[in-house]
Every structure is written in C-alpha cells, then in structure tokens.
Amino acid sequence: MNWYGTFAGLLFAGTLAAKLACASQAISCPATAASTTHTQDVPTQISGLPDRVTDSTAACPIDARLNIGNEPMPAPEKSTASVDDTPLTTTKSTENAEPVVSNEKVQRTEQPDFNREIYYRNKLEFAWDVGALPFNIPFPFDFLEGDQYTEHPLKYTLVPVIASLRWHISNIGGPWIFRGNWDVTSSGSFTWIPSGPETRFISYDMGIRRNFVPRNQRFAPYYEIRLGVGQINAKGPKGVPYAQGENWPEFTMNMGGGVRYNFSPRFAFSGGINYMHLSNMDLSEHPPNATDPNWGPINYGINVFGPMLGIDVRLGKGRTE
C-alpha cells in the first residue's frame, strides 16, 4: 500500500470516529471543522470509499446539528413581521353553505294591537248620531203576534238625532271574527218627522253594542240595539187614519249595524244602516166606555229604516290600566 492509500484510510477512520463521537455525546461539530469549506477529490482506489469526501460538517450527523440530546432546544424567536398579535384566521366561503336549521320552535312576535288603546273597559265616550229613515217596511216581528206582514198606506220619514254616553264595559276578547268588546249607551233622542201626520218624537233610550275588532285595523264592524220610551204628538185620536194612537207612552226600538273608523284613540266616525220602530204596544186600543163610547184608536206603528251616521269622542284621559 502506498502513502496515498494510507492517507485515505486514515481520513476515513477519522470521519467515522467523529460521527460516533457526535452521536454519543450530542454535541455540535467543532468550529474548526465547520470552518473548513474545501472539498478534496480523492480517487477511488479502495473499495467502499466514496468518490468525493467532504469536510467535517458533512460528516456531522443531522441529529447533532439539530441539538437532539439532553440539552433543551432554544425557543423560537417571535416574528416581528406582523403589526399586531391578532392570529390569522381562515374562513370558508359561504356561497354554497347550507342553512342551519334549529330544532327549537321559532316563536313569532306579533306587533302590539293599537286597538287595545281604543276599546277597553271603563272607557267613556260622547256619541252623536243622525239618521235619515225614509224606507217603510212591515213590522219584522209580526209573526210573534200572529199577524201578517202587511204594509200600511200611510208613509213616514223619520230623522232621529241621538246624543249618547257610550260606556265600554269590557276589554277586547273573543275568538276569530267574534273578537271585540261590548259597550252600553244611555241616550236622549229627538226625532223629527218631515213626512207623516205627526211632527216630532222625544224619547229616552238605552242600548248595547258589540264591536268586532280586528287586530291593528282602524275599521271595526258593529251591531247594536236600543230600546226607549217617549212622547209623540199623536194624530190618531184626532181621526187621522193609520196615525199613532196616543201621545204617551210611545215605545221605540232601534236596531242596526255598520262600521266604525277610528282616527285616533280619541276620535272615531261610524256609518251604517238603522231600523226604527214606534208603537204604543196596543195600549190605545180599548173597548168603548162611559167617557169614550167608541173603540180606542188602533195601533198601527211606524217601521222605517235608512242610513245612520255618527261620531264618537273619548271623554277624559286615555287608558291607564
């Protein structure tokens, strides 16, 4: 073996010893060895030797350079490239995302009903109603007396003017289309008779009305009935055919329906159809007696209907409950 082969063998043995030392003691490669950057080209004369042998840094195993051993690795330095410490987050595109369906029951919140500030218990109103009733019809309840539905030849036109105190006796309640409240009226009425033998009728009336109140609607249908008693300047005792039989008492009944429109909780307007009946309940019909040898005047009554208009104005403050 010549000197060149001897040198290569020594170099190979030193490299192998360096590897064993670094792996067993977990130390970095010597600085002197790391500073060597030249490369020697060694001809391959010994079997098993590589064509090129590098410096000691190449001989240092990767685990030694990463400081794998008993000593802890130093913590990585914090990057200063970011302006703040806000972590970066990634978001997925929601274009194709499916909607999330909750198993909980969704409760719908309904808008508060402003009509509860209009129709409520103990509300007091002043009402003014005026009608024009020119249409004559038979008495609708003739069947209760066993009479036929006959219309008398004498025609009347009545113009009632009614001033009332309207007292709401309940809050809004009831199901479906019957939802609403009740009010009662106490009225003084003057009825002008432009067509007929009599000229006027004065009465006191009391009634009840059902207001059908939809949610959050200014229009509210109603139906009402009023009963009263009063005095009329009857012409029947003076011999006028089909006129009223006596001045007092003269009874009245009003029935009708329509629609009320609420401008505000204080003011409202109403319009509808009203039926009015006048009669003395046959009290004028009596058999002959000492003071009156003839039968008393027959009670024919008055039955008319027509349009009725009115206004309602709240008295006092609004709802305080």
Image (tube, rainbow, N blue to C red):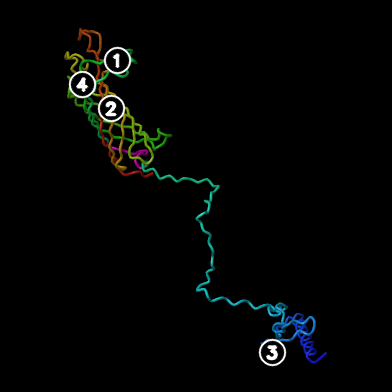
Task: Provide the residue designation for mark 4.
Answer: 156
Give left or right: position of 40 versus 133: right
Q: Residue at image x 54%, y 67%?
A: 88
Q: Earlier in the sequence, mark 1 or mark 2?
A: 1
Location of the C terminus by quadrant is top left
Asked if the residue at tag 4 contacts the one at tag 1, i.e. Cβ–Cβ closer than 8 Å, the answer is no
Quadrant assignment, res 267? top left
Front position among marks 2 and 3: 3
Q: Earlier in the sequence, mark 4 or mark 3?
A: 3
Asked if the residue at tag 4 contacts the one at tag 2, i.e. Cβ–Cβ closer than 8 Å, the answer is no
Q: Residue 149 bears which disc, if any?
A: 1
| Disc 2 element | strand
Asked if the residue at tag 3 contacts the one at tag 4, i.e. Cβ–Cβ closer than 8 Å, the answer is no
Q: How far apart are labels 1 and 2 at the CA level?
A: 20 Å
What amino acid is found at the position of numbered circle 2 in the picture? Asn
| Disc 1 element | loop
Task: Provide the residue designation for mark 3.
Answer: 32
The x, y position of residue 289, in whole percent, is 23, 8
Judging depth in this view, the residue of 75 and 157 nearest the camera is 75
The magenta-colored residue range is 117-126
Front position among marks 1 and 3: 3
Judging depth in this view, the residue of 162 and 98 nearest the camera is 98
**Does residue 249 show up?**
no
Q: How far apart are labels 4 and 3 at the CA level?
A: 135 Å
Q: How far apart are labels 2 and 3 at the CA level?
A: 121 Å
Quadrant assignment, res 13? bottom right
The relative height of residue 74 versus residue 195 in the rendered view (above or below) is below
Asked if the residue at tag 3 contacts the one at tag 1, i.e. Cβ–Cβ closer than 8 Å, the answer is no
Front position among marks 4 and 3: 3
What amino acid is found at the position of numbered circle 1 in the picture? Tyr
- Please check the rendered image and state whether residue 214 is part of the magenta-colored stretch, yes or no: no
Q: Residue 274 bears which disc, if any?
A: 2
